[in-house]
Image (spheres, grey):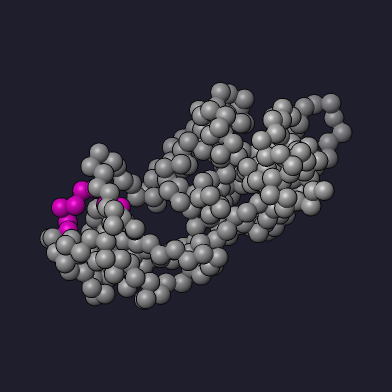
């Protein structure tokens, strides 16, 4: 069993971090948030204009919601597992993986801990006098209710991976302060997707030779759906990859240099799975 103790690493409270990020964005005066708004449909608006499709004043999309219709120049999908069956996104191989985290009351034997310990799960320093341990990993589950047996699993996993520490802390079910069950948005390779939405039909028409030769070198620009972007799939180490993904998306939108090389761009691009399926002949290519 391998246990990682990262003495020079940092850890953050996700909820507090998100609040701070949104608060900072609001101070720019450029952020508008619509709460309790359910988007039911996204429709591409056909344009009769000579303006380029990325013109900032051109409305390319109509969003149908419970608060009426909204129009937008650009749409970015950046949700979690609860939207993977939405139009457009249901063409990509996202999946839902349920996980339960258990919050344990601190005590004098564990309170001095000042860094995250990673094993098959993880143990955090105390925050508001509670430590987080976890987490379970249940594929293709949409359950967000907590189960006592999953709390027990988390406690037992800590004991299995770090028996000396677990014996010293001596946690039991009576030390559970709270539990939380949520859904991870996952991809087959556990890396996020960031970039333009691929036009799947045009991919099949453009790269048919890949089905015969996976090493075929092509120079064509990948066909995409204009002004529709994705930044999702952060179910595995998402707090580490999301800032870099945001920089990549910013470069896509603003035409600025990418912060990574072409190989990494492809490794994170949504169309990597379309290319993979063409190579594996999963797209009805003759």
- Residue at figure coordinates x 71%, y 46% from the top left: 278
From the top left corner, tell me how far across and down residue 55 is, in percent.
72, 28
* Residue found 24% across the figure and 55% down from its top: 126
**In the rendered structure, which segment of residues is drawn in magenta?**
110-118
Work out whether residue 16 can be spotted: yes
Q: Between 255 and 190, which is closer to the camera in this rendering?
A: 190
Q: Nearer the viewer, residue 255 or 241?
A: 241
* Residue 165, position as x, y percentages in the image: 18, 61
Query: In terms of depth relative to the viewer, which is nearer, 47 or 83?
Result: 83
Determine the residue positioned at 73% across, 50% down: 281
Say if the magenta span includes residue 113.
yes
Q: Position of residue 235 (x, y in %)?
A: 48, 53
Q: Is residue 19 above or below residue 134?
A: above
* 121 shown above or below 267: below
Q: Nearer the viewer, residue 109 or 76?
A: 109
Along the horizontal axis of the image, is 273 left or right of 115? right
């Amino acid at each position: 069993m391998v246990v990682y103790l990262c003495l020079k690493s940092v850890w953050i409270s996700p909820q507090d971090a998100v609040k701070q990020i949104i608060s900072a964005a609001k101070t720019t005066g450029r952020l508008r948030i619509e709460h309790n708004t359910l988007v039911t449909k996204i429709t591409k608006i056909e344009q009769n204009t000579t303006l380029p499709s990325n013109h900032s004043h051109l409305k390319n999309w109509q969003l149908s919601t419970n608060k009426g219709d909204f129009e937008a120049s650009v749409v970015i999908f950046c949700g979690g597992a609860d939207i993977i069956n939405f139009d457009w996104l249901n063409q990509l191989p996202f999946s839902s993986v349920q996980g339960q985290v258990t919050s344990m009351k601190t005590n004098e034997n564990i309170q001095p801990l000042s860094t995250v310990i990673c094993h098959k799960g993880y143990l955090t320093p105390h925050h508001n006098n509670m430590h987080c341990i976890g987490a379970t990993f249940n594929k293709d589950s949409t359950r967000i209710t907590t189960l006592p047996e999953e709390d027990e699993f988390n406690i037992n996993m800590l004991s299995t991976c770090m028996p000396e520490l677990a014996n010293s802390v001596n946690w039991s079910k009576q030390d559970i302060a709270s539990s939380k069950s949520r859904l991870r948005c996952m991809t087959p390779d556990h890396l996020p997707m960031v970039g333009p939405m691929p036009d799947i039909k045009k991919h099949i028409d453009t790269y048919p030779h890949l089905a015969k030769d996976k090493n075929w070198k092509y120079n064509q620009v990948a066909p995409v759906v204009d002004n529709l972007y994705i930044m999702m799939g952060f179910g595995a180490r998402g707090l580490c990859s999301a800032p870099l993904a945001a920089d990549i998306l910013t470069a896509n939108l603003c035409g600025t240099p990418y912060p990574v090389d072409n190989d990494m761009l492809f490794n994170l691009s949504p169309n990597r799975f379309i290319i993979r399926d063409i190579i594996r002949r999963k797209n009805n290519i003759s």
